[in-house]
Amino acid sequence: MELQDAIANRRSIKMFKRDMVIDDQVLYQAIEQSTYAPNHGMRQPWRVVHIAKNRLGEMSKQVSRIAFHHQPDKQQDHYNAVTNLGGMLALIVQEDPRQKENLENYLAFGAFAQNLMLLLHEAQIGTCWKTPQYIFLPQIRNVFGVKDNESLVGFMYLTDMEDEMHHPPRQTQNIMTQF
Ligand SMILES: Cc1cc2nc3c(=O)[nH]c(=O)nc-3n(C[C@H](O)[C@H](O)[C@H](O)COP(=O)(O)O)c2cc1C
């Protein structure tokens, strides 16, 4: 697949209404290749926790007990959605006490994440990066073993591509002015 095609055609997949599987070996290879992303000081400020297909249900129970306390309907919705996925990644960035280095770490994480979404798209694995409000809760951070000097910056939902929607092309944006 041409890089231009991958960039133009990758879209967040937000349909989780049927059971899906993905090839974990392909996922692991894409994660490894994504670490070729630029990162200042070669701090490699990223890590991921893989929630494999057979662990999604247990993860959902632990997360939704905290995130949707006393909301059984929302707990069930979460369970139904995520157990249909082919897997999930918890996305974790290394914090740095220095302002500039901390910014660089977050920016590098974005480069890593885009590499990952493009490589998975090429491998016919759909993705959606999710940033629910509850990623900031200490109990949720504990579920995924996020350390004090790390931030949980969301979850990557992993799907097959059967339900890939055919989105209209993006509007071209004029983001450039001349100096
Ligand atoms: C950092 C980040 C956080 C996102 N968080 C969410 C989210 O919480 N829920 C969601 O449905 N989509 C989320 N998305 C997906 C965007 O909404 C999506 O990228 C946007 O709609 C553009 O569509 P595309 O990815 O299909 O091109 C997130 C994307 C990024 C990059």
Image: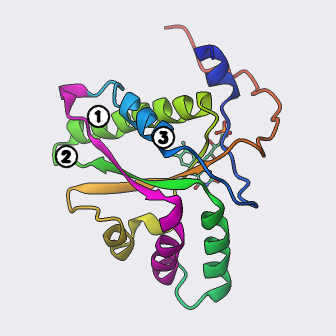
The disc placed on residue 27 is: 3
Residue in the image at 76% along x and 61% along y: 17
- Give me the C-alpha separation between circle 2 and circle 1: 9 Å
Name the image quarter holding the N terminus. Answer: top right
The disc placed on residue 96 is: 2
Residue in the image at 48% along x and 40% along y: 27
Tell me the chief SS of the magenta region: helix
Tell which residue pokes out farthest to the bottom in this image. Answer: 70
Q: Give amino acid for label 1.
A: Glu
Crowding at dot 1, Cα within 10 Å, few <14 / some 14-19 / many 20+, comes out as some
Crowding at dot 3, Cα within 10 Å, few <14 / some 14-19 / many 20+, comes out as some
- Element under label 3? helix
Q: Give amino acid for label 2.
A: Asp
Magenta residues? 40-67
> Nearest the camera: 102 or 67?
67
Q: Position of residue 158 (x, y in %)?
A: 58, 49
Q: Position of residue 60 (x, y in %)?
A: 52, 73
